[in-house]
Amino acid sequence: MKILVVDDEALLVKGIRFNLQNEGYEVITGSDGLEAVQAVREQHPDLVILDVMMPNMDGLTACEKIREFSDVPIIMLTAKAEDMDKLMGFDHGADDYLTKPFNILELKARIRALLRRAGGSEKKQAGNTLTIGSIALDLDARNAYRSGQLADLTAKEFDVIEFLMRNPNRVYSREALLDTIWAYEYRSDIRTVDVHIRRLREKLEENPAEPKYIMTKWGVGYYFRK
């Protein structure tokens, strides 16, 4: 699946591209509305992520022009949170809307939902669940289970375990997890990661002191063992 990301904030585009490529998407990028319209015409992406405030041509105008020849799903990004701005985005043809700062995992969830709604062929686990060993995630309801028993996870704990389970056996440093899970919300204390890992072990491991799945690579970071 090919996703077009258009925003004049280079670091934001870089972060989104990195995270989506890790999910297996092909990612193409642009920095203004004119590039967005041209890329949709020439490269036929399966989904577009489009910022509202950009040079040369703003996102709303670009969205409107894209709608003249394509029904590709479009997610608008904006720093403005007012309902009227959202309504303007929908009036111009947007399918969904995210206000900056946003959680990168929420963006991924919106992408999956739009691709599913558009009839995309994104590879998913049967029943939209992700299961490794005795740990299972219901990705739609955002529930986690250990050996069939519901585990009471916070929203952020679910974000962490979902990310690790989607990328099994790959070690992530605390800094990388902060950048990914807490990406655009705020810069948290690095110990936040340790606290969430400890709580996940308490809730999902049979023996938190000797974890089977949520592992530490000493001096490097954490990973989910498959």
Image (tube, rainbow, N blue to C red):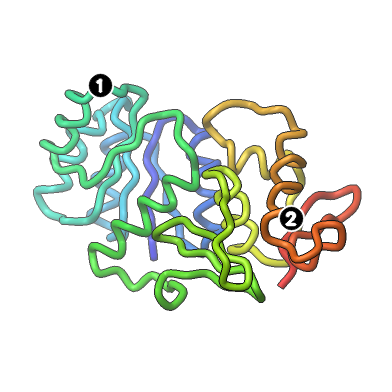
Determine whether the residue tagged by mark 2 lies in a helix, strand or loop.
helix
* Mark 1 → mark 2, Cα distance in angstroms: 39 Å
Position of residue 22 relative to residue 18, above or below, is: below
Other residues around mark 1 within 10 Å, as few (<14) / some (14–19) / many (≥20) = few
Dot 2 amino acid type:
Arg
Res 170 visible? no
Which residue is denoted by mark 1 in the rendering? Answer: 82
Tell me the number on the disc at residue 5.
Answer: none
Which residue is denoted by mark 2 in the rendering? Answer: 201
* Percent coordinates x, y for residue 8 in the rendering: 41, 30
* Percent coordinates x, y for residue 226 in the rendering: 71, 73
User: Does 8 sit left or right of 33 as displayed?
Assistant: right
Q: Quadrant of residue 116?
A: bottom left
* Residue at the spot 21% in from the left edge and 38% down from the top edge: 62
Q: Nearer the viewer, mark 1 or mark 2?
A: 2
Determine whether the residue tagged by mark 1 lies in a helix, strand or loop.
loop
Q: Quadrant of residue 161?
A: bottom right
* Percent coordinates x, y for residue 44 in the rendering: 28, 60
* Residue at the spot 57% in from the left edge and 36% down from the top edge: 183
In depth, the one of 162 and 8 nearer the eye is 162
Dot 1 amino acid type:
Glu
* Residue at the spot 67% in from the left edge and 66% down from the top edge: 168
